[in-house]
Image (tube, grey):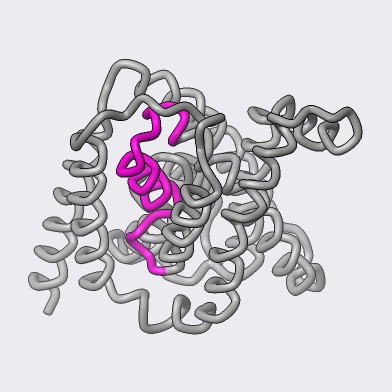
Amino acid sequence: MISTFQAIVLGIVQGLTEFLPVSSSAHLILVPWLFKWPEDPGLAFDVVLHLGTLLALLIFYWREWLAMVMSLVNGDRVQRRLLFLLIVASVPGAIIGVLLEKEAETIFRSPVLIAGTLAALGILLWAGDAIGSKKRKIDEITLFDAILIGLSQAFAIIPGVSRSGATITTARFLGIDRADAANFSFLMATPIIAGAGLIEARKFFHEGLTAQLGWGFAASAVFGLLAIVWLLRFVRNNSYRSFAIYRVALAVLVVAVAFARA
């Protein structure tokens, strides 16, 4: 069983890295590995961390989701179209997540493999952010764009890829504005996280609630909300290059530690 301190740290890590394009799954594996903590805090803890980030999304985007839901009855074509695109974009990730769930929990958890995916996606993020004109807004996203972004989200099942990293990178390659690339990515994450969290939540009710679960949930929600707010402000005047550099630097550190321990 993890301690309260470890629960809070992992909650903070989940909240920040779920939305920054650096891979939450990689960090939740690497932090315990680096500090030699228990590497599997349990299904219940994993679920509450994701429910915490779901709460952060709902707090920040509740107006947008309300507008999209109301568009089904009030005839708002712009919001109805956005809702349709988000549904389309969510399908590939949901399917791949179900098909590769067991692999994600076993063969994809190697620190060296994670280092490779961290570095590779970091380079792609850098390139996608730097190449070409990037001025398209969220209401200019096409059905084809949504399908491609949704397919990229499916690769986030591999730790180190990052859901936000993959979708933001793809959106940037498609010429979408930095802030709207992040907004579409975060809106896409809401049904995926909600679906996964609700499916897994059924499995842990018999375990009971603990203080560690509560602290992890709270830390994940608070720092997830802070990460959303900060990133959207940051990318108004800055590129994603710093996140790409961080990913590559972390990959180098992981490989160095792995070889030192070998």
Q: Is residue 123 left or right of residue 33?
A: left
Question: Within the magenta stretch, is there residue 171?
Answer: yes
Q: Which residues are magenta?
A: 158-181
Q: Is residue 249 above or below residue 243?
A: below
Q: Is residue 110 above or below residue 67?
A: below
Q: Provide residue 151's location: percent of width, then percent of height.
A: 46, 62
Quarter of the C terminus within the rendering: bottom left
Q: Residue furthest top?
A: 237
Quarter of the N terminus within the rendering: bottom right
Q: Which residue is nearer to you in this view: 256 or 161?
A: 161
Question: Within the magenta stretch, is there residue 69?
Answer: no
Q: Provide residue 165's location: percent of width, then percent of height.
A: 37, 48
Residue 212 seen in this snapshot: no
Q: How many marks?
A: 0
Q: Residue furthest right?
A: 73
Q: Which residue is nearer to you in this view: 142 or 5?
A: 142
